[in-house]
Image (cartoon, rainbow, N blue to C red):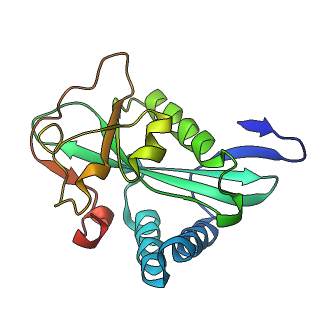
Amino acid sequence: MSIRGSKSILHFISGHSGREQEISRLFTETFTASDGADEGLLIGALVDTFMQSTPASDLFVFSACVDQTLVGAIFFSRLTYSADDRTVFIMSPVAVKTQEQRKGIGEKLINHGLAHVRDKGVSVAVTYGDPNYYSKVGFRPMTEDFARAPLKLSFPHGWLGQSLTAEDLTPLQGTARCVDALNQHDLW
């Protein structure tokens, strides 16, 4: 999909094959600029692990490019609930190059990713982040009584979800389990 701007074209790419270093560098640099070097290294290592070891059936990666330059990327990974048969994916992490932020690229990329995973049968999307930002793309706050997180949340008000079907979001049942790459206490 491409969106034409006044001078350049924003387009989206699915997958990460052959672009792993570029995507890793984007996350490391963006999180370093916003949250410091330690966070940049942590998130850079996370995306490396996602791309190297998460089964393709448990991972979606989407990138935003302006002309031929990578300006943003998002990851969706499987989240399972022991007593719930709905297909759930968590959207995390998300990065847009620092100099490209506040131009609507992140929202367009997230909406593209949500539409794609919906088309692939995902019925619920969750994320963990800034409620003010993610509410712009349909996410709503959830409590852990409504949907347990796989690990203890350090920022409980950032636990958010949305239904990707015509049905309202109802509580997710059972114990939550994330993919191995996300199964780290310092990420939650």
Q: Which residue occupies 52% across, 34% down?
A: 116
Q: Give percent across and percent down for residue 96.
A: 61, 58
In this view, the residue in front, 77 or 188, is 188
Q: Residue furthest bottom?
A: 37
Which image quarter: residue 6?
A: top right
**Relative horizontal placement of residue 131, taking residue 188 as reference (left or right):** right
Q: Which residue occupies 37% across, 16% down?
A: 166
Q: Which residue occupies 19% across, 52% down?
A: 177
**Relative horizontal placement of residue 47, taking residue 54 as reference (left or right):** right
Q: Give percent across and percent down for residue 65.
A: 72, 53
Q: Residue furthest front?
A: 132
- Up-down: is 33 above or below 176? below
Q: Give percent across and percent down for residue 26.
A: 60, 68
In this view, the residue in front, 82 or 102, is 102
Quadrant showing the C terminus: bottom left
Quadrant showing the N terminus: top right
**Relative horizontal placement of residue 1, taking residue 85 as reference (left or right):** right
- Up-down: is 104 above or below 164? below
Q: Residue furthest right?
A: 7
Which image quarter: residue 39?
A: bottom left
Q: Which residue occupies 58% across, 42% down?
A: 107
- Up-down: is 14 above or below 29? above
The count of marks equals 0
Q: Give percent across and percent down for residue 101.
A: 65, 56
